[in-house]
């Protein structure tokens, strides 16, 4: 069973980003992948800021990344870049920590004006971490994700279509295909 880690750099677990994360998780699980969500916001702030590699929480989080067959990097877009929370965690990942792993970016922002954040802000950092199999990714606009009264999320048809294509590409890379 392929192991996929979803690395969320959202400072809020109420973010619409979780509409993308939840949908992607369900699709990957249906395809036969084991999916683990790593919320950076749940890690001790002081350990992150001080790069405390002796912290059991940081060690465990980095072990998840190391053991993964693929990584999904998810973040909201603030000020034309991914979250600082995501960056502070990525700074702890070893230099070659993403080598050989497909990486799928999932981003959400207020407007299409920040569409290129994946290409110009994220991909150079992933490349520096050994990421050579960076998939196209999905950039969504907030309006494409509706918060439903039951706490779930409704996704626009276009967004579902784009997520489905990205999950299919990832599962093909991982050679799993229950979809």
Image (cartoon, rainbow, N blue to C red):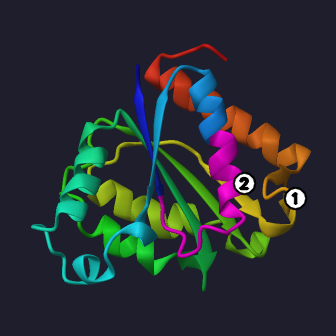
Whether 27 is among the magenta residues is: no
Q: Residue at x 45, y 23 (%)?
A: 174
Q: Residue at x 75, y 42 (%)?
A: 162
Left or right: where 73 falls relative to 45:
right
Q: Is residue 76 above or below residue 79?
A: above
Tell me, yes or no, if residue 74 can be seen here: yes
Mark 1 and mark 2 residues within 8 Å of each other at the beta carbon: no
The residue singled out by tag 1 in the image is: 148
The image's mark for residue 19 is 2
Q: Which residues are magenta?
A: 8-24
Tell me, yes or no, if residue 115 can be seen here: no
Q: Residue at x 23, y 66 (%)?
A: 92
Position of the C terminus by quadrant: top right
Q: Indicate the position of residue 14 as horizontal and vertical percent values.
A: 67, 69
**Within 10 Å of the Cα at label 1, are there few (<14), some (14-19), or many (20+) other Cα atoms?**
few
Tell which residue pokes out farthest to the left in this image.
54
Q: Indicate the position of residue 23 as horizontal and vertical percent values.
A: 70, 42
Q: Indicate the position of residue 17 as horizontal and vertical percent values.
A: 66, 61
Q: Secondary structure at mark 2?
A: helix
Whether 17 is among the magenta residues is: yes
Left or right: where 171 falls relative to 42:
right
Q: Secondary structure at mark 1?
A: loop
Decide which of 149, 146 is in the foreground and name it.
149
């Amino acid at each position: 069973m392929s192991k996929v880690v979803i690395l969320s750099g959202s400072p809020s677990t109420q973010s619409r980003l979780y509409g993308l994360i939840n949908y992607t998780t369900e699709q990957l699980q249906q395809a036969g992948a084991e999916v683990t969500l790593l919320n950076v916001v749940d890690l001790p702030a002081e350990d992150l800021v001080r790069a405390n590699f002796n912290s059991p929480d940081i060690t465990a989080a980095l072990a998840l990344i190391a053991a993964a067959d693929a990584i999904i990097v998810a973040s909201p877009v603030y000020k034309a870049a991914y979250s600082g929370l995501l960056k502070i965690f990525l700074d702890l990942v070893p230099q070659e920590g993403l080598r050989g792993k497909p990486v799928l970016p999932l981003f959400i922002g207020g407007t299409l004006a920040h569409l290129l954040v994946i290409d110009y802000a994220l991909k150079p950092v992933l490349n520096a971490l050994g990421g050579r199999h960076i998939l196209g990714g999905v950039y969504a606009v907030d309006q494409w994700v509706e918060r439903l009264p039951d706490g779930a999320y409704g996704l626009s048809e276009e967004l579902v279509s784009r997520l489905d294509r990205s999950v299919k590409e990832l599962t093909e890379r991982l050679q799993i295909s229950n979809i």
